[in-house]
Amino acid sequence: SLHKIHFYQKSENLIFLKIIFTCLVHEIDEENHQFQYSVLDIIQVTAEFTLITLFK
């Protein structure tokens, strides 16, 4: 629920564990790109913000 999402955002700053999100990005990436950790962080924050906005 939206309440749980807000709770996790406040407590851990991110909804998904970094390793799980990183695996998801690599699974989606068909070209086998190399991603810097800072880029993965930006992608994750943007994706989570988008999901939260859609569920509001």
Image (cartoon, grey):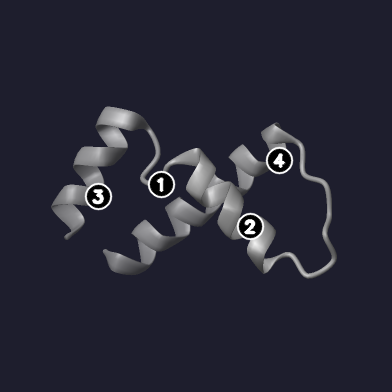
Q: Residues within 10 Å of mark 1 (few under 14, many from 20)?
A: some
Label 3 sits on a secondary structure element that is helix
Q: Are marks 4 and 1 in contact (CB under 8 Å)?
A: no
The dot on residue 16 is 1
Q: CA distance from mark 1 to mark 2?
A: 12 Å
The answer to whether residue 45 shows anywhere in this view is no
Q: Is residue 27 left or right of residue 15?
A: right
The earlier-in-sequence mark between 1 and 2 is 1
Q: Amino acid at mark 4?
A: Val
- Residue occupying image coordinates x 50% and y 40%: 18
The residue carrying mark 4 is: 39
Label 2 sits on a secondary structure element that is helix
Q: Amino acid at mark 3?
A: Ile
The residue carrying mark 2 is: 25
Q: CA distance from mark 4 to mark 1?
A: 16 Å
The residue carrying mark 3 is: 5
The answer to whether residue 47 shows anywhere in this view is yes
Residue 24 drawn at (x, y percent): 57, 59
Q: Amino acid at mark 2?
A: Val
Q: CA distance from mark 4 to mark 2?
A: 11 Å
Q: CA distance from mark 2 to mark 3?
A: 21 Å
